[in-house]
Image (spheres, rainbow, N blue to C red):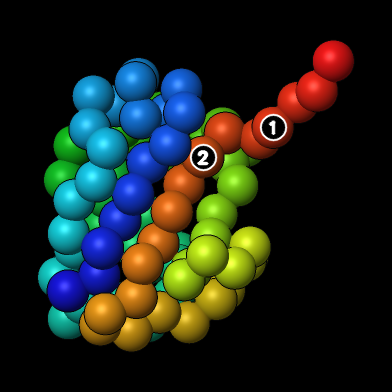
């Protein structure tokens, strides 16, 4: 299993803070996103927006390899003011 966490406004908009994704057939972060989009059609719009992504608390890109036991986090870009 891969632990998936959502933070900030993304967590509020999706209505969930975390869930688990079966790691079978998953090899990259892109695959995790595709699995999440398949779980809930309403979530597809959020994965079209710019998101920051981390695997095991390290900022990564979509091609980052993931394996069972990894923690994946998604959050909206941070802006300052």
Rendering coords of residue 25 (x, y %): 23, 80
- Between residue 16 and residue 38, name the one nearer to us: 16
- Specify whether 7 is left or right of 50: left
The disc placed on residue 75 is 2
Q: How dense is the environment of label 2, judged by Cα within 10 Å: few (below 14), some, or many (20 and up)?
A: some
Rendering coords of residue 26 (x, y %): 29, 77
- Specify whether 41 is left or right of 29: left
Which residue matches tag 1? 78
Seen as rendered, the residue at the extreme top is: 81
Quadrant housing the N terminus: bottom left
- Specify whether 50 is left or right of 70: right
Quadrant housing the C terminus: top right
Rendering coords of residue 4 (x, y %): 30, 56
Q: Is residue 25 visible?
A: no
Among the 4 quarters of the image, the one containing residue 46: top left
Q: Are marks 2 and 1 in contact (CB under 8 Å)?
A: yes
5 lies above or below 11: below
Q: Residue at x 47, y 28 (%)?
A: 8
Q: Residue at x 66, y 35 (%)?
A: 77
53 lies above or below 11: below
């Amino acid at each position: 299993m891969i632990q998936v966490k959502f933070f900030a406004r993304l967590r509020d908009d999706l209505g969930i803070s975390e869930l688990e994704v079966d790691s079978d057939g998953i090899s990259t972060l892109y695959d995790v996103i595709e699995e999440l989009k398949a779980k809930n059609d309403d979530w597809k719009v959020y994965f079209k927006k710019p998101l920051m992504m981390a695997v095991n608390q390290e900022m990564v890109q979509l091609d980052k390899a993931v394996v069972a036991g990894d923690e994946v986090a998604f959050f909206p870009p941070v802006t300052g003011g």
